[in-house]
Image: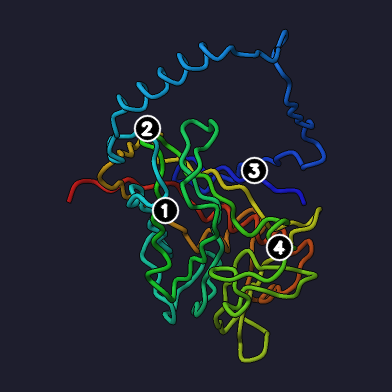
Amino acid sequence: MRLFTAIRRRCTKSKCRTKSPGISDLPELRSERMAPAGWKTIKYEPAIRLILLAMLIAGISSFQHIPFSQKTKIHSTAPPNLILHFKATVHGQPLLLHQNYTNSFGENFKPDIFRFYAGKISPALNDHAAVKAFGDGAYHLIDFSDTASTTVSLRVPEGVYNEIHFLLGVDSIDQTSGAKTGALDPARGMFWTWNTGYLSFKIEGTSPDSKEPAHGFSYHIGGYRWPNSTVWRMKIATRSDQQFRVERSGTTNLVIPIELDYFFDGLTPIHIRKTAACTSPGETARLISGNFTGAFTGIEIPGPP
């Protein structure tokens, strides 16, 4: 599978897009265990053994237990210190499902379902290597019909950051590694078949401009095989390159808006009257997924209450 990279730095309708190298393009990394030069087996005399034993006992007796809270390493069971709030909007206003809206092409539409997968989330600074969120190798199903699911709580190392990286969709390993539970449970309605895998996102609703039965529109966007993969590595920066700090104690809150109008009016304009449905992998799904990456307009850092 080849993953694409989507970069969104400010609240603009930027259409910047770059491809990340496929797995086959990356250099092979090898690790070999080697003994230091001159490594030898040393035989100790009994007297030396007694001296070493005494030193060991003295060291153990002088060991001072350090409370967990004073250790620099962050444990996965520690409370979250970074909370992400995914916020869907239309024309800058909060999205309400089952309400009528008008897109940039003058088409009326009423969204009823809006959900997507965000996985392997981590903060980063200036596109440097992202740090791993403890216990968050998982996927999160962001479903705007379930308010609780739109908030993701993470535990990350303290530091200064200005980006959030995550996988939009489900990577090939998790697509093909058998039955899943939790967010990837097929019962959640985001799974096609073992051949075509998981959807990256799903948007459904109705529109008088749709020529589909019951004037419905449905974008079930998935597919993880090259060249029509809909899985993206997202790198979302704060607006105006602001930085945010995450402390070991306390909580940092961030808002990640998703402007649905940019989904329709993106690199590949989606006119409901022309393309009201896409429910299988392929080139159309890939192009539509590119539009969705453009809906992420940048990270908002809430001010003091």
Disc 1 from disc 3: Cα separation: 19 Å
Rate crowding at label 2 as few (under 14), some (14 to 19) or many (20 or more) other CA atoms within 10 Å.
some
Rate crowding at label 3 as few (under 14), some (14 to 19) or many (20 or more) other CA atoms within 10 Å.
some
Label 2 SS: strand
- View extreme (top): residue: 38
Pointer 3 or 2: first along the chain: 3
Kindly identify which residue carries mark 4: 175
Residue occupying the point 74% across, 38% down: 21
Rate crowding at label 1 as few (under 14), some (14 to 19) or many (20 or more) other CA atoms within 10 Å.
many
Which residue type carries mark 1?
Ile
Q: Nearer the viewer, mark 3 or mark 2?
A: 2
Pointer 1 or 2: first along the chain: 2
The correct choice, above or below, for 88 with respect to 108 in the image is: above
Pointer 1 or 3: first along the chain: 3
Disc 1 from disc 4: Cα separation: 26 Å
Which residue type carries mark 4?
Gln
Residue 266 position within the rendered picture, expressed as x and y whole percent measured from the top left: 60, 56
Label 1 SS: strand
Pointer 3 or 4: first along the chain: 3
Relative to 190, 147 lies left or right: left
Indicate the quadrant where residue 84 lies: bottom left
The correct choice, above or below, for 83 with respect to 123 in the image is: below
Identify the disc placed on residue 256: 1
Label 4 SS: helix
Which residue type carries mark 3?
Arg
Residue occupying the point 71% across, 41% down: 19
Kindly identify which residue carries mark 3: 17
Residue 185 position within the rendered picture, expressed as x and y whole percent measured from the top left: 59, 73
Disc 1 from disc 2: Cα separation: 18 Å
Kindly identify which residue carries mark 2: 160
Q: Nearer the viewer, mark 2 or mark 4?
A: 4
